[in-house]
Image (cartoon, rainbow, N blue to C red):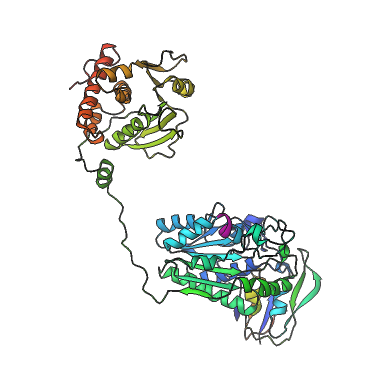
Amino acid sequence: MNYITIEPNLCKGCKVCITSCPKHCITLGDAINEIGYQYAVFVPGSPCIACGICFYVCPEFGAITVYKDEEETHG
Amino acid sequence: MIKHAKSKALYDTFERKGAGQQVSHYCPGCGHGTVHNLIAEALVDYDITDRTVLMSPVGCSVFAYYYFDVGNFQCAHGRAPAVATGVRRTLEDAVILAYQGDGDLAGIGTAEIVHAANRGENITVFFVNNAIYGMTGGQMAPTTLIGQKTMTTPEGRDALHDGGPIGMAEMLNALHSPVYIERVSLSTPQGVLKARKAVRKGLKYQMEKRGFSFIEILSPCPINWKMESGASRKWLKDNLEPVFPVKNFRDHSKEEPLKGQKSELMTGQQLLQLLQGDAAITEFAESSLQEEQYVKIAGFGGQGVLSAGMFLAKGAIAEGLEATWLPSYGPEMRGGKAYASVILSRRIIGSPVVDSPNVLIAMNLPSLLAFEADVVPGGHIFVNSSIIERKVTRKGVQTVYVPASDIAKDAGLLAAANMVMICAYLACTGALSIDTIRSMIPQSVKQEKHVQANLKIIDASLSYLQQQGLISSETELL
């Protein structure tokens, strides 16, 4: 199973990952993080193919980590 | 397993932003972070982090040194390619990245990028073009589009008033030397992946010592474009890309890397030969210099002030010393103010500027008035008393009055009054051997009759100094 994690306090909510994901696995959460942004979240159970596009388009450092063939434990 | 994660070429936390900080200073949706990530990934994949030196520009990405765990120079505005050149010439194995924005590279640094590219420096330049000055708040940049509204073009950029957007990739593609030139765009995920490839090519070619690579990256600036991140990427695609075509301009990687003659450093002997022209190299006495000499020679243009300074510096080099010569003169060839700052030392000299001389050679009155007060206590002042009637008024210095113009005139060469002053200075202080000066004259003076006149002037000068009791009578005369 593939999934990504998004560090809540490293995301500035620019939504570029959301619009770039070919499988629509990411959405904007409701919560506001420490630096004042609504941050993106991975939709649990969505059909992520670990393509890494979200990782490459993300302008932040280390906000997104992509896991391939692993049980989702980070939520 | 982890397939993609933060690159190890980026610091875990950005201490210089404040303890424990992990978030960048870039605005939401800014393209810089994406470019940083692509570069950082490649540095780790190629295992070159430890030998990479990054040139930070002036602009939003000035803080690249907060993030990249590599060597760094924060360069003066626009000068990243020039600093990169210096690093290239110094560190043969370094991987050198110049990271610049459009204001930095296409504005103030236009000359530096063109000439670094033209020299084919083996460096990789990442040019992040967002068509606006970001850091200073959205002013027009050289790459701003016609009609694009910015803070300084509120009605839109006007081609007749402001010129048109500069295509840097096109401009550099007119040059012979660059190896790789490509323009990419961050407007779409596909574009980002192409940018990733270009970044890696640019680094790979440098590692293969192929030469100059230039990657122009069209990048969104949502804040200064006053758009949402998503809209900024669409605007980038619809407006920037038609003006700045996204394509490969050049890839000469298939051709053999340019091979040049690697110039070796000159030996001391070769350097001496060069300084002395075709003249035979003379063996000079070992220097007996005791104290570093900070000399100011001043007069009016035509008195041989600058050449006297040069003569001293060459004499010092001939004796194996370090020397600097820094001329200062007005636009007039003759009659204007002129002075030379000369430093003679046993150690490498940091700066050639002489603010507080310990030797002042004043050839005319304005020079004495201008610099008398600057001489350090215990220093020497040599006064051309032929044309300076005034006496030195300050205390704590040793003053020597020499009628230099008269001595030179009597010996048949008034223009060599500077030589009289040099003799007086050297004979009284022992800074350089008079024999060194004698040996240099045939190599420095072109006409034979002037050689003889200069040699005669040296003897006349020493005789005068002996008569005045300024030097001992044992000082050797020819």
* Most common secondary structure along the magenta stretch: helix
Give the quadrant of residue B34: bottom right
Quadrant of the frame with the C terminus of chain B: top left
- Residue B329, given in percent of the width and then of the height, sits at 44, 33
Taking the magenta stretch, the answer to whether it contains residue B106 is: yes
* Most distant residue in the front direction: B160
Q: Is residue B119 visible?
A: yes
Question: Left or right of B119: which side holds B477?
Answer: left
Question: Left or right of B255: which side holds B241?
Answer: right
* Most distant residue in the left direction: B478
Quadrant of the frame with the N terminus of chain B: bottom right
Residue B318 versus residue B452: which sits nearer the camera? B452
* Most distant residue in the right direction: A30
- Residue B354, given in percent of the width and then of the height, sits at 45, 32
Write the start and end of the magenta stretch as one range. B104-108
Q: Residue at x 20, y 27 (%)?
A: B452
Give the quadrant of residue A68: bottom right
Does residue B58 sit above or below A47 in this rendering? above
Q: Residue at x 31, y 25 (%)?
A: B415
Taking the magenta stretch, the answer to whether it contains residue B81 is: no
Give the quadrant of residue B460: top left
- Residue B350, given in percent of the width and then of the height, sits at 43, 40
- Residue B157, given in percent of the width and then of the height, sits at 68, 61
